[in-house]
Image: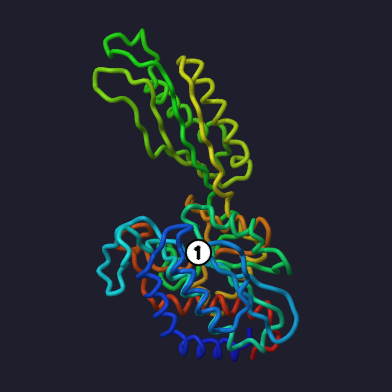
């Protein structure tokens, strides 16, 4: 981009930043869980409406979509932010700490929303420089890994195809103010499972008269771990984790049922497609071997997040030109954390990049916070990505 374009964007961001910080704090103070983000949605729609953007009616209870039409025809670019919070009691002591007991923006979504609203504020003032349109997508229920699916089914990507779609995530594992990008698979796909084992209860002194569901659960959990070691490509990270197990009621009895729940994370498409079938086959074998009945509820949440290599390269190149070579990092390995933005990337070429907030900031913890100076970096990269696609005369 021309130097004058970046200077103009810097000026507009500085002028807009107080409003963006104010919005971030309002959003932080009123967090809402997935598919419950009604106050959040109302505030977002209010800001977008004040800017004169075209609000797209999605017939959804939460979430918002708006379009900014440029001064002349051209392609369309999408920008997405997630808007939901987590069921965590906040312990930051901030003056704008959560006013909703037991709910907190502990994953930076308040920052994501503020950055995207700030981007809209800046791009609205550059409207005549845009040859094309920008679609602003504020997605609910990312923490449930369900919101992207809902929005896509409701038609958020219908109409004029998006040439690119971008998203960011505040990320502790990237140094403050740096941009981390991984071409190809950047984040894991996620599944959730719940297994119920029905046996025959009895006295602990007479196990031969029972069909022990706890023994079946123990064998099942051990066997399922071999999926990673024996069924998937060792070059593609895969995780099977059991997070909850329940069974029995007394030390000297054999209960009649047991349950366990967990998650599967995959980075390779082969493993993502293969594991559900292997999972059920293994449990059927354990059921036969132990004389129990095993039922499995296996739910697909989202596929691996795969950045378009072209889009990722564009983000890296632009980051280097804007912030310097040392602040643009090409990452080398995907994270096993999941993000349902991958569903958008199955439909449209694009990229999610990580905006560094420093390692002392841990996601999903009661004390999570970030330095608000980082909002400027996120806004600048979003704005310049749009200008790089929609403007040949932005200087």
* Residue at the image position 61 percent from the left and 55 percent from the top: 343
- Residue 208: name its quadrant: top left
> Compared to 280, does 48 lie above or below?
below
Instruction: Classify residue 343 as left or right of residue 95.
Output: right
The percent coordinates of residue 283 (x first, y second) are 51, 25
* Front one among 130 and 332: 130
Residue 31 horizontal/vertical position (percent)? 39, 65
State the image coordinates of residue 298 (x, y, percent, origin top left). Answer: 53, 37
Residue at screen point 53% across, 20% down: 285
- Quarter of the image where the C terminus is located: bottom right
For the N terminus, the quadrant is bottom right
- Number of numbered labels in the structure image: 1
Whether residue 184 appears in this view of the structure is no
Name the element at disc 1: strand
Tell me which residue sits at (24%, 21%) in the image.
Answer: 251
Q: How is the image coloured?
A: rainbow
Q: Position of residue 188 (x, y in %)?
A: 53, 50
Residue that numbered label 1 is attached to = 82
């Amino acid at each position: 981009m021309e130097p004058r374009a970046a200077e103009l964007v810097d000026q507009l961001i500085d002028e807009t930043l107080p409003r963006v910080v104010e919005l971030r704090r309002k959003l932080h103070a009123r967090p809402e869980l997935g598919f419950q983000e009604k106050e959040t949605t109302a505030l977002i729609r209010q800001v977008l409406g004040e800017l004169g953007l075209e609000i797209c009616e999605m017939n959804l209870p939460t979430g918002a979509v708006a379009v900014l039409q440029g001064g002349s025809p051209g392609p369309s670019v999408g920008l997405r932010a997630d808007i939901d919070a987590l069921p965590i009691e906040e312990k930051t002591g901030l003056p704008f700490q959560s006013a909703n007991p037991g709910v907190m923006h502990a994953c930076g979504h308040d920052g994501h929303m503020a950055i995207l609203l700030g981007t809209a504020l800046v791009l609205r003032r550059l409207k005549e420089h845009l040859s094309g349109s920008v679609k602003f997508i504020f997605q609910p229920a990312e923490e449930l890994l369900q919101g992207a699916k809902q929005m896509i089914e409701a038609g958020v990507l219908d109409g004029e195809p998006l040439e690119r779609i971008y998203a960011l995530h505040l990320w502790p594992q990237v140094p403050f103010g740096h941009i981390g990008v991984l071409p190809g698979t950047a984040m894991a796909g996620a599944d959730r499972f719940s297994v119920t084992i029905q046996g025959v209860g009895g006295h602990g002194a007479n196990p031969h008269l029972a069909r022990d569901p706890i023994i079946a659960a123990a064998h099942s959990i051990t066997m399922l771990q071999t999926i990673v070691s024996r069924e998937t490509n060792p070059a593609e990270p895969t995780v099977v984790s059991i997070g909850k197990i329940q069974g029995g009621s007394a030390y000297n009895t054999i209960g009649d049922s047991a349950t366990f729940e967990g998650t599967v994370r995959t980075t390779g498409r082969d493993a993502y497609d293969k594991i559900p079938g292997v999972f059920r086959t293994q449990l059927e074998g354990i059921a036969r071997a132990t004389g129990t009945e095993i039922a499995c509820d296996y739910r697909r949440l989202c596929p691996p997040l795969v950045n378009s290599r072209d889009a990722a390269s564009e983000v890296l190149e632009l980051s280097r030109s804007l912030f310097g070579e040392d602040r643009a990092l090409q990452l080398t390995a995907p994270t096993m954390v999941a993000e349902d933005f991958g569903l958008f990337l199955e439909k449209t070429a694009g990229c999610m990049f990580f905006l560094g907030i420093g390692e002392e900031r841990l996601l999903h913890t009661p004390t999570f916070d970030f330095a608000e100076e980082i909002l400027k970096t996120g806004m600048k990269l979003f704005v310049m990505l749009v200008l790089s696609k929609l403007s040949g005369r932005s200087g």
